[in-house]
Image (spheres, rainbow, N blue to C red):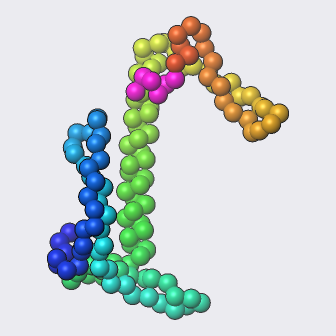
């Protein structure tokens, strides 16, 4: 996205060192000029936004695009978990069993059970 130089002011750039990242990254704190259209129906609410000389974007379409991106990211993360679990099963020949237990002082929780060295968490195999 291109913006006119007077529509954005960068306040701070902080490198974000990620040891396993394939690309460098940073956190940027910036002020961005955004135009908003509002509607007053039982209180003011923003209905559309735009930056620079770009077209107006409805909040509903922005929300739908954001939700789509979050769903795709979550789906990818779930696929990674499935692959890790399958790799665990292939390496060990079984899944560990989870036992449901109840505490007198709190909600129920799951406990990993198994034998020998199989008590390591699945996360350690990722």
Q: Quadrant of residue 46?
A: bottom left
Does any portion of residue 38 appear in the rendered image?
A: yes
Classify residue 86 as left or right of residue 17. Answer: right
Q: Quadrant of residue 17?
A: top left
Would residue 124 be counted in the magenta stretch? Answer: yes
Vertical comparison of 113 with 47: above or below: above
Q: Residue furthest top?
A: 116
Q: Quadrant of the N terminus?
A: bottom left
Q: What secondary structure is the stretch in magenta mostly built from?
A: helix
- In the rendered image, residue 48, in percent from the top left (x then y), is placed at 38, 82
Residue under the point 63% across and 18% down: 113
- In the rendered image, residue 9, in percent from the top left (x then y), is placed at 24, 73
Classify residue 24 as left or right of residue 112. Answer: left
Residue under the point 43% across and 60% down: 67
- In the rendered image, residue 18, in percent from the top left (x then y), is placed at 30, 40
- Report the number of discs: 0
Residue under the point 52% across and 18% down: 120
Would residue 2 be counted in the magenta stretch? Answer: no
- In the rendered image, residue 95, in percent from the top left (x then y), is placed at 54, 19
Q: Nearer the viewer, residue 81 or 122?
A: 122
Q: Quadrant of residue 76?
A: top left
The magenta stretch is: 121-126
Q: Residue furthest bottom?
A: 40
Vertical comparison of 89 with 105: above or below: above
Residue under the point 26% across and 58% down: 13
Does any portion of residue 86 appear in the rendered image?
A: no
Q: Quadrant of the C terminus?
A: top left
Vertical comparison of 56 with 28: above or below: below
């Amino acid at each position: 996205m291109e913006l006119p130089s007077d529509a954005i002011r960068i306040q701070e750039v902080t490198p974000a060192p990620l040891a396993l990242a394939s690309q460098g990254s940073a956190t940027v704190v910036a002020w961005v000029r955004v135009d908003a259209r509002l509607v007053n129906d039982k209180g003011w609410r923003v209905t559309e936004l735009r930056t620079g000389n770009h077209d107006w974007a409805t909040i509903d379409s922005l929300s739908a695009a954001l939700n789509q991106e979050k769903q795709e990211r979550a789906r990818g993360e779930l696929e990674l978990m499935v692959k890790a679990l399958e790799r665990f099963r292939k390496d060990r020949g079984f899944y560990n069993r989870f036992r449901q237990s109840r505490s007198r002082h709190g909600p129920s929780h799951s406990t990993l059970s198994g034998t020998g060295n199989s008590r390591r968490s699945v996360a350690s195999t990722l």
